[in-house]
């Protein structure tokens, strides 16, 4: 059994240490969660399709359980996510067999935000209000989603306004991936800057931090944090994992990470936390997209069924040696 100090207690004066959880890991990683994390995010259970499968049907059973679990163990809870192009039920974009009109879609979005943010008012300290609306392509600003097709960019500011009205104390984030890529980080910066100039209640930028042992560079991560912080908003690391594979590496033959992979991951984690400590005045929380290597969404992404080992706790729930050095 482990003898190391609590991860979150070690950073309590700097930032929260969080984990995404699901019904499986709430059991398999229960002890690790209780000892080492003080902030929780539902990995899938608060997404639109989970909470709101059809127009007049909400399903809060599992998300309520997670909020209760957080309260019982005195963990802070984040909300993920209100407006996204993925894992969002088709019905919201449909009307009379065709595409929904703008007024109706906006009304449906508001009704959803009012219901969900209202239900958890005071229980969720921070919401990923809008997720992944910036395009990866260099010649494009916004992602071409159904939200965008029907409403243009206006849904973004509306989403923040509706969420803020329902819970004025929650920290409201714009959240995205490839957030350290120079071209994309400039667009994310521009988006949040424009929102701030219009007095839209956006309080922070969520850097998903789906990183790997080679990318992105420390320099690009630093620049991203600095750039977002220069807007006077909070930065959160919202979905961190450090894959053992470069993104375009599609190998499937490894059942264990190589020594070289492990050494690189150790080095990367140490450097990432050096950067987080350096910018601690701007960073409110660091959330991992899971707890321990026995379960990660990376076992199915981007290569289905391939094992990965992205966390600071191994598949037996034991802290990796690098965690000692981070503390
Ligand atoms: C992922 C979950 O981890 C998976 O279980 C699910 O199948 C797909 O979504 N960006 C996000 C998260 O904002 O919601 C995604 O989570 C990972 C990428």
Image (cartoon, rainbow, N blue to C red):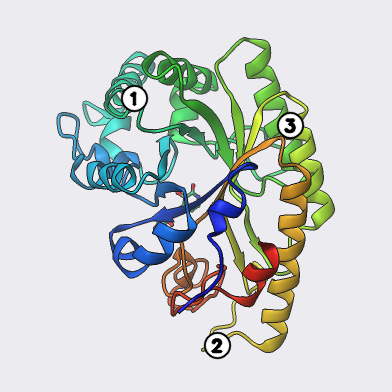
Who is closer to the viewer here, 315 or 220?
A: 315
- Above or below residue 278? Residue 318 is below
Per the rendering, the mark at residue 238 is none
Q: Nearer the viewer, residue 70 or 300?
A: 70
Few, some or many residues within 10 Å of mark 2 (<14, 14–19, 20+): few
Residue 229 lies, in percent from the top left, at 74, 31
Percent from the top left, x then y, of residue 213? 70, 69
1 or 2: tag closer to the N-terminus: 1
Quadrant where the image shows the N terminus: bottom left
Of labels 2 and 3, earlier in sequence is 3
Q: Is mark 3 within 8 Å of ligand 1?
A: no
Q: Which residue is mark 2?
A: 256
Distance between the alpha carbons at the discs numbered 1 and 2: 43 Å
Residue under the image location 70 percent in, 21 percent down: 193
- Answer above or below: position of 247 versus 117: below
Residue at the image point whose x is 52% and y is 71% from the top = 313
What kind of element bears circle 2? loop
Mark 3 and mark 1 in contact? Answer it, CB < 8 Å. Answer: no
- Identify the residue position indicated by label 1 in the image: 121
Using the image, tell me which numbered label, if any, was put on residue 229.
Answer: 3
Q: Nearer the viewer, residue 261 or 10?
A: 10
């Amino acid at each position: 059994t482990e003898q190391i100090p609590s991860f979150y207690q070690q950073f309590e004066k700097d930032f929260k240490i969080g984990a995404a959880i699901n019904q499986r890991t709430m059991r398999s990683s229960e002890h690790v969660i209780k000892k080492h994390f003080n902030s929780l995010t539902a990995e899938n259970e608060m997404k639109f399709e989970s909470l709101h499968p059809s127009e007049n049907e909400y399903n809060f059973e599992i998300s309520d359980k997670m909020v209760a679990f957080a309260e019982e163990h005195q963990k802070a809870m984040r909300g993920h996510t209100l407006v996204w192009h993925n894992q969002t039920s088709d019905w919201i974009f449909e009307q009379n067999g065709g595409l929904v009109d703008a007024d109706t879609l906006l009304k449906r979005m508001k009704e959803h935000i009012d219901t969900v943010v209202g239900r958890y008012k005071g229980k969720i300290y921070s919401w990923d209000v809008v997720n992944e609306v910036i395009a990866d392509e260099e010649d494009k600003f916004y992602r071409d989603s159904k939200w965008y097709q029907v409403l243009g960019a206006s849904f973004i500011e509306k989403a923040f306004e509706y969420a803020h009205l329902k819970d004025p104390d929650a920290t409201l984030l714009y959240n995205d991936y490839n957030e350290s890529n120079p071209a994309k980080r400039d667009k994310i910066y521009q988006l949040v800057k424009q929102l701030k100039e219009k007095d839209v209640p956006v309080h922070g930028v969520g850097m998903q931090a789906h990183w790997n042992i080679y990318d992105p560079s420390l320099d690009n991560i630093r620049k991203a944090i600095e750039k977002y912080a220069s807007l006077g908003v909070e930065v959160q690391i919202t979905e961190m994992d450090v894959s053992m594979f470069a993104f375009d590496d599609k190998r499937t033959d490894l059942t264990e990470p190589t020594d070289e992979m492990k050494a690189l991951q150790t080095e990367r984690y140490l450097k990432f936390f050096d950067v987080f400590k350096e910018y601690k005045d701007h960073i409110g929380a660091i959330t991992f997209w899971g707890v321990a290597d026995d379960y990660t969404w990376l076992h199915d992404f981007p290569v289905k069924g391939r094992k990965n080992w992205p966390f600071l706790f191994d598949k037996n729930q034991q802290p990796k040696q690098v965690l000692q050095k981070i503390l």
